[in-house]
Amino acid sequence: MIAKTIYKACSTKILLPGLFLFMVNITNAQVVLPACFTDNMVLQQQTKANLWGTETPGINFSIITSWNNKIYKVQTDGQGNWKIKVSTPMYGGPYTIDFNDGKITTLKNILIGEVWICSGQSNMEMQLTGFYGDVLNLNDELTGAANYPEIRMLKIDNKTSFTPISSVQTKGGWAICDSKTVRDFSAAAYFFAKNLFPGKHIPIGIINSTWGGTVAEAWTSGNALKTMPAFAPFVNAAEAGLTQQKLDERYQTDVSGWIDTINAKDPGFLQGKPLWAEPGFDDSAWQKMTLPVYWEQAGVPDYDGTIWFRKKVLIPAAWAGRDLKLNMGGVDDYDVSYFNGTEIGHMEAFFYKRSYTILGSLVKTGENTIAVRVFDNGGLGGINKGPLQLSLATDTTGQIDLAGNWVYHKALVLTLLPQPPSMSNSPNRPTLIYNAMINPILPYTIKGVIWYQGESNADRATQYRQLFPLLITDWRQKWGEGNFPFYFVQIANYNLFGQPPAADWPALRDAQLSALSLPNTGMAVTIDIGDANRIHPQNKQEVGRRLALIARAKTYGENILYSGPIYKSQAIKGNEIELEFTHTDDGLLAKGDTLKGFTISGADKKFHPARAIISGNKVVVTSGAVANPVAVRYAWANSPACNLYNGANLPASPFRTDDWNEIR
């Protein structure tokens, strides 16, 4: 905790242990600092680093930096805000900064070095050990982490806001890397920092602003998003005074409309009535499935959309006419549930348990019918994640176990259905995360950004081709530090149970690849180090190392190889296509006997497996099934078998040589 520094909420005098808040306190004449300024912080070396905060309006005070004993004179404005730039030396420390307004506030153990923002969704948020699993060789990493006290990390709390705010929240301030604290570090960012200056002990500060499962538009400013028609209406509504209450009301309206639309398309409804939920409906031709289970694990692979489930259950005479509870541990993603043909509840969230009340007027002795229509919006689908039971509403000691055989029937595939509305409390709304987790740290002087995100936008890959460059350009404009380095991770291979077919991961990777057209960008390819069965691969060591290679070469000027082969051009020569690449350093090579992962197409746009051979620094692709080829794709699958590398042992990026709109 910062010595002598007081963190208060507005005009109150309540101290919040472990929670640093940047809020104005005008009643006390003492400097109040933003939460990103704490003991153990890292400032960017050899620059004019910003310091800012609040004090009494119109007051003069001084700041003293110990690395040069320089005194800076500061005056607050009419609202009590102040901001100043301080000159920082070459890396080193520890140092102190004194803020003297009659009382001295001191920040201690400050290091001067390199400051990087790490941001994105869960694969950047993933800690060395925690909710998303453990990294490879965790015990070895925890032991080694004790040797990196020059690495510091600041975690920004996950918050949203409808308008840009200047306050930011963190828990605990800047943390020094050791075998205990490193457990909570972003794993990819930690391994990036660890590999950035091996053996040189140059301090590295990582500002960790990440949130799992989030979309890129949530991380982009409203001003930028207004240039994209898909997002402009929400941004304009927010600027016009959209509140959480109004959003909740809109969400309920949108959900009702969405359900009505789904019902109108669903063959399980007849003239607005749920035919497939009726007790007398003949389901003898339906197939059987043992629940609870994800349907991908039960004979329904590669399917997203709606499936109806039905089960007949015998109710004892003692339960007849009494209120019951239907308890389901979880549904992926949404459900509407029925008892004897009457709806008893619905939920548009995959992570909540269901507990629906069945009115006694619906309950009769003997055979009763439960029906559940499940809507799966991508990835795994079905009734899973816990118990499946029926009980009395007032006495849950007696239960009827509903696990076991149900009958099911497909209704509508996802591509025929409208997308469901986002939850009213979802962070996945345009600009809400940017407002609360990026805007407040824009004044912090940084070297660059590392970014790992894209999985949550994979169902809108074409849109991402515009959105992702917009985000990069937006951040650079808002930070006001020019085209600073922005290095990102191309999403890894993943294909659990052949899913998610609705999400176009190859096209998303292609959109990421296209962002390299922006200046001072770099991409770490991870198509070879993912895990087909885990959306959060454990090998974050190599992710961080590859990001660090890019920074060492492009930012810090080391003469090292940092990228695998990147497609440059093609030449059609008869029945062959000859491919040329950049980054063929030390030659092209195939890991294994022959090249894998290439497909080739003629003008009919139908791709066939191809034979590919290395010829110098080029690859020649042919197929007996395509006499007149026009296009090649490489590693064009969610989890492809591919093995093209260069001599630096870095993998080639997936690519396509065509520009067809139908890019799946």
Image (tube, grey):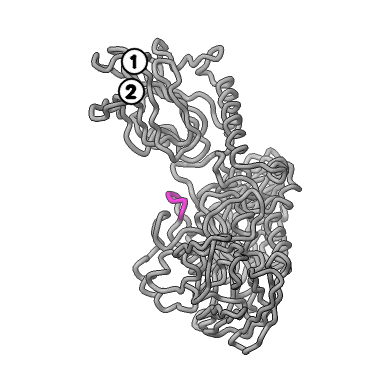
Give the number of the disc on residue 324: 2
Residue 351: x percent and y percent? 44, 40
Residue type, numbered disc 1: Val
Is 351 positioned to the left or the right of 472 in the image? left
Segment tinted magenta in the rendering? 532-536
Residue 336 shows in the view: yes
Looking at the image, the residue that sits furthest to the right is 227
Is 491 positioned to the left or the right of 604 in the image? left
- Between 509 and 544, the one lying in front of the other is 544
Query: Mark 2 to mark 1: distance in Å?
Result: 8 Å
Q: Which residue is mark 1?
A: 363
Q: Secondary structure at mark 2?
A: strand
Q: Earlier in the sequence, mark 2 or mark 1?
A: 2
Residue 599: x percent and y percent? 60, 48
Question: Is 600 part of what is drawn in magenta?
Answer: no
At 41% from the left and 74% from the top, the residue drawn is: 178
Question: Is 535 part of what is drawn in magenta?
Answer: yes
Looking at the rendered image, the quarter that the C terminus falls into is: top right
Is 266 positioned to the left or the right of 280 in the image? right
Residue type, numbered disc 2: Leu
Answer above or below: position of 510 versus 331: below
Looking at the image, the residue that sits furthest to the bottom is 69
Answer above or below: position of 289 versus 55: above
Residue 540: x percent and y percent? 47, 63
Contact (CB < 8 A) between labels 2 and 1? Answer: yes
Residue 578 shows in the view: no
Residue 424: x percent and y percent? 56, 39
